[in-house]
Image (spheres, helix red, strand yellow):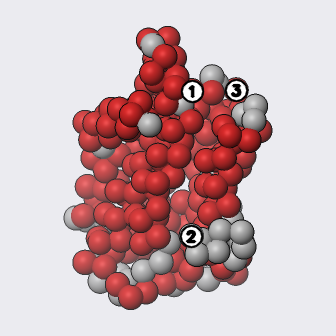
Amino acid sequence: MSSSIDLITWAAREAAETPVTGSAYFTALEQEMSREVFTRTQRQFFFAVRYFSRPMAALTARMPDSISRRGLVHNLAEEHGADEAHPARLDPELAHDRTFLHFLGTLGVSKEEMWQIREGPAARAFNNTLMGVCHMEPVPLAFGCMGIIEHAFAGISARIGATVVRRGWIREEELVHYKLHAEIDERHAADFFEVVSTDWKAGAARRVEIEDGVHLGLHVFRRFYDDLYQEAAA
């Protein structure tokens, strides 16, 4: 356990030094981004939310036994509607793509409208990057990449939630999805990092793969937000 704590501490420090929230997207969100442009970015972000469990499932399939798959299976269950009170039951309304649709509804985007919207290049590039990482890259690298994205998204969710309420776009009592992820994604990140904690402890060669994965995850996540902003503002 101590090795996973060391890894989480290191990863959190790397995320703080090059924060995803330091990107142009979040600077604009705090200042000049309009509600309309924000909504456009979130309509495209839906495609990443809907897709995220697929690379996770691909990574799960690469793990050799039930012990190494356990944290991923738990995360996959929550993606599909499990909660802490009823972990064996999947509530479709708690599935993360459904909660994000509810969030879009508070912005005035209907489910029917979403079915007509096509996935843009930014979301497709992000999704395909994660699938390629989880399917083809070294396993420690993939866990580092996915783990740091989960870690970053906890803070991102809290920031987006606070900002949309402060700017008057959504009432606090109506806030869904981002409130949930601000609470659970640190735990999800810990599940990813725990799997590769022995690799982290083993020495330089395996540790380098995890480091590369963390740096890749921070890069592609930050780039994704900036690309969403450019697409929506064009």
x 49%, y 30%: residue: 197
Query: Dot 3 lies on which element?
Result: helix
Q: How far apart are marks 2 and 3 (CA)?
A: 32 Å
In this view, the residue in front, 141 or 68, is 68
Read off the residue under disc 1. Answer: 140
Mark in the foreground, 2 or 3: 2
Please say if the residues under marks 2 and 1 sit with CB atoms less than 8 Å apart. no
Question: Relative to 218, is 158 above or below?
Answer: below
x 46%, y 54%: residue: 187
Query: Dot 2 lies on which element?
Result: loop
x and y, in percent, of residue 39 in the image: 46, 71
Kind of residue at badge 1: Pro
Please indicate whether residue 131 sits to the left or right of residue 228 in the image: right
Mark in the foreground, 2 or 1: 2
x and y, in percent, of residue 2 in the image: 39, 34
Question: Relative to 106, is 21 above or below?
Answer: above
Read off the residue under disc 3. Answer: 136
Kind of residue at badge 2: Glu
Read off the residue under disc 2. Answer: 84
Q: Distance between the residues labelled 1 and 3?
A: 11 Å
Please indicate whether residue 216 sits to the left or right of residue 76 in the image: left
